[in-house]
Every structure is written in structure tokens, then in C-alpha cells.
């Protein structure tokens, strides 16, 4: 993971957020949609304000609450996109599991499972895309074919044998 320090006000390092290109495109599309929603929320607030007494005006309070949610989401997405480190799995190689790798493992029941290690924004366990921050991905990263991985999950300890590492 690459760290870019800002010794200024905070003194904390600004951490890059690894993601695939499609994850970055998804975040920027969400950001664009939220920015487009801003004027509509302002219009809704103005319209609700015109109805009079704000203390008992449910439309006004709902619009203000939505405005707060949208602004928080925009700030979060702007932060993630500004720190994005876009990784193309096809440009990677090696014999160890890294971000972007597609890993085939054998579980305790001799069942083959395939996972791609991706960013948090693009993770979807149903299609085998797991976040690099997940317990399984953390257990796999840095390991090689033939190594056994023990992962502690809420249902207990799981064991996997790494069968294949691909960069596709």
C-alpha cells in the first residue's frame, strides 16, 4: 500500500484507496448523480419553507435531512476518488496473492472456490469479489500456491488451500 504523507495540519498519512477501474467509474457515477440531486433538494427545502411554520413542517425536515445525507455521501465519495489508486489486474504478475488477483482455493470440504480481491466499493461476495479488507482477503494476501490459510470468521475458523493465482 502506498502512503502519501501530509505533515501539515493533521500529521496523519493520507492512505491510498486501491480499486479496479470499474470501481472508480462506479464511484464517479454515484458522485455525479448525487451532485445532480443537490439543486432538487434545495428546491424542495425552499418549497417546504414557503409552507410556513418550520417547527411542524415534515417536508422541510425531511428535505434538510436528505440534504445532510447527500452532502455526507458526496464528501465520502470525493475523498475516496481523490485517494483512488486504480489497479489493472492484467498488468500484475507474480506468485503471491495481491490486490486484484483472482485466487482459487480448496475449502475444508474439498470444494473449489474462486475469489477476486477488490476494493471495498466493488466487492460482492455473491459473485466472488471480496474486499481486500475482509478477513479472507487479509489471510490470502502475501501467500503463494500450495500454502494453507486459516481465517477466523464469525462462524469459526476456516481453512483454505491456495490452488491457483491468476491476474485476469
Image (cartoon, rainbow, N blue to C red):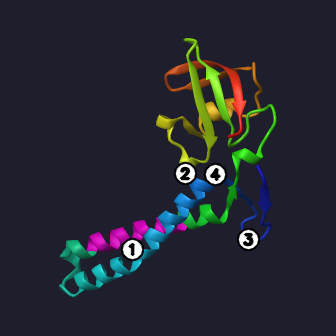
Towards the viewer: 139 or 90: 90
- The mark nearer the N terminus, 1 or 4, is 4
Q: Which residue is mark 3?
A: 9
Q: Judge the density around disc 1: few (<14), some (14-19), many (≥20) Cα neighbours within 10 Å.
A: few
Q: Quadrant of residue 65?
A: bottom left
- Identified at 69% across, 21% down, the residue is 163
Residue 135 location, x and y as percent?
61, 33
- Asked if marks 3 and 1 touch (Cβ < 8 Å), the reply is no
What are the residue bounds of the magenta stretch?
61-75
Dot in front, 3 or 4: 4
- Gap in angstroms between the C-alphas marked 1 and 4: 26 Å
Q: CA distance from mark 2 to mark 1?
A: 21 Å
Tell me the tag on residue 121: 2
Mark 2 neighbour density, 10 Å: few (under 14) some (14–19) many (20 or more): some
Q: Give the distance between the C-alpha atoms of the residues marked 4 and 2, in whole angstroms.
A: 9 Å
Tell me where residue 99 sits by quadrant. top right
Tell me the CA gap for discs 3 and 2. Answer: 28 Å
Mark before the other along the chain sequence, 2 or 1: 1
Residue 76 rendering spot, x and y as whole percentages: 54, 63
The numbered disc on residue 146 is: none
| Dot 4: element | loop
Q: How far apart in space, not on screen, are marks 3 and 1 (Cα)?
A: 32 Å
Q: Which mark is residue 20?
A: 4
Q: Nearer the viewer, mark 3 or mark 2?
A: 2
- Residue designated by label 1: 37
Q: Earlier in the sequence, mark 4 or mark 2?
A: 4
Left or right position of 42 against 153 = left
Amino acid at each position: 500500500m502506498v502512503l502519501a504523507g501530509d505533515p501539515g495540519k493533521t500529521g496523519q498519512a493520507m492512505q491510498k484507496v486501491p480499486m479496479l477501474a470499474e470501481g472508480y467509474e462506479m464511484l464517479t457515477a454515484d458522485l455525479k448523480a448525487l451532485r445532480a440531486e443537490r439543486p432538487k433538494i434545495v428546491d424542495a427545502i425552499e418549497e417546504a419553507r414557503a409552507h410556513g411554520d418550520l417547527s411542524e413542517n415534515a417536508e422541510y425536515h425531511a428535505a434538510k435531512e436528505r440534504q445532510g445525507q447527500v452532502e455526507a455521501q458526496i464528501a465520502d465519495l470525493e475523498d475516496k476518488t481523490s485517494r483512488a489508486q486504480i489497479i489493472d489486474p492484467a498488468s500484475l504478475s507474480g506468485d503471491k496473492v495481491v490486490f486484484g488477483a483472482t485466487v482459487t482455493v480448496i475449502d475444508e470440504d474439498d470444494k473449489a472456490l474462486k475469489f477476486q480481491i477488490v476494493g471495498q466499493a466493488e466487492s460482492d461476495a455473491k459473485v466472488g469479489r471480496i474486499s481486500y479488507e475482509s478477513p479472507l482477503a487479509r489471510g490470502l494476501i502475501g501467500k503463494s500456491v500450495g500454502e494453507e490459510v486459516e481465517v477466523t470468521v464469525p462462524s469459526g475458523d476456516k481453512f483454505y488451500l491456495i490452488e491457483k493465482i491468476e491476474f485476469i
